[in-house]
Image (spheres, rainbow, N blue to C red):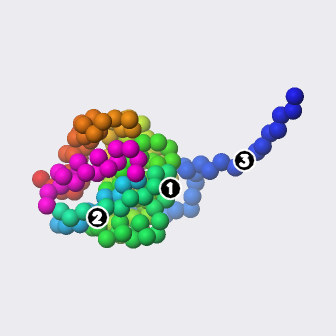
Amino acid sequence: MQVKIVEKDILDPLGDIDQVNLDLNPIPHDFEYISLVDNTKPGADIILSLLAENLGNRKFITVKKPAGAPATVEQLEMASEGEIALIALGDCGSCSSWVILDAIRLEKRGVPTISICSERFAEFAHELAKSHGAENLRILSVEHPIAGLSNNEIQTKTLPILPSLKYILQIP
């Protein structure tokens, strides 16, 4: 029997990079426009809709991007029109990576961000942000899993993060 062994390089998303610490943009005290960045993961739209409904009389800019892939320049430009960006949903390895990396890209464009990941991937998300110089990146965790749940179940898992979101956004 013959066995063919192939060596491949593997990218470690937590690898060392030459990055200075990224100072996060402050949340404005008074803001009107919020970008909702939906990576089209199952449930991301439900989470973002529920959060938007509970943030008062604000205007929302919806940006959809593919899960497990970076936002395009056009998608980042559109998300940058908001004074704040909420990004969902990181509930697997590649989509969590891109939620965090897109948040860092938006922070570099001057947009304060809040990322939403499931609790199973929150520790990874924090480590990834730290490895890219954004140790204090704002990341909220929803209970895992989200995929495969009904809208009501997703809403029930989202409600516990509302107080933290309102606190971060300084909304009474």
Residue at image location 34% in from the left, 44% down from the top = 43
The residue under label 1 is which amino acid type? Ala
Q: Which mark is residue 119?
A: none
Give how far apart the Cα atoms at labels 1 and 2 are: 20 Å
Task: Residue 171 in the image: state x and y as whole percent.
Answer: 15, 55
> Dot 2 corresponds to which residue?
61
Residue 137's quadrant in the figure?
bottom left
**Three-letter amino acid code of the residue under disc 3:** Lys
* Residue 141 % position (x, y): 33, 42
Q: Is residue 127 left or right of residue 58?
A: right
Whole-angstrom CA distance, mark 2 to mark 3, is: 41 Å
The magenta segment is 40-57
Q: Earlier in the sequence, mark 1 or mark 3?
A: 3
Which residue lies at the image location 45% right of the left edge and 48% below the top edge? 96
Give the image location of residue 88, x and y in percent. 36, 51
Pick out the residue farthest to the right: 1
Looking at the image, residue 108 lies above or below residue 50: below
Q: Is 143 drawn above or below residue 168 in the view shown?
A: above
> Which residue ends up furthest to the top in the rendered image?
1
Residue at image mark 1: 69
Residue 64 spot, x, y in % from top left? 38, 59
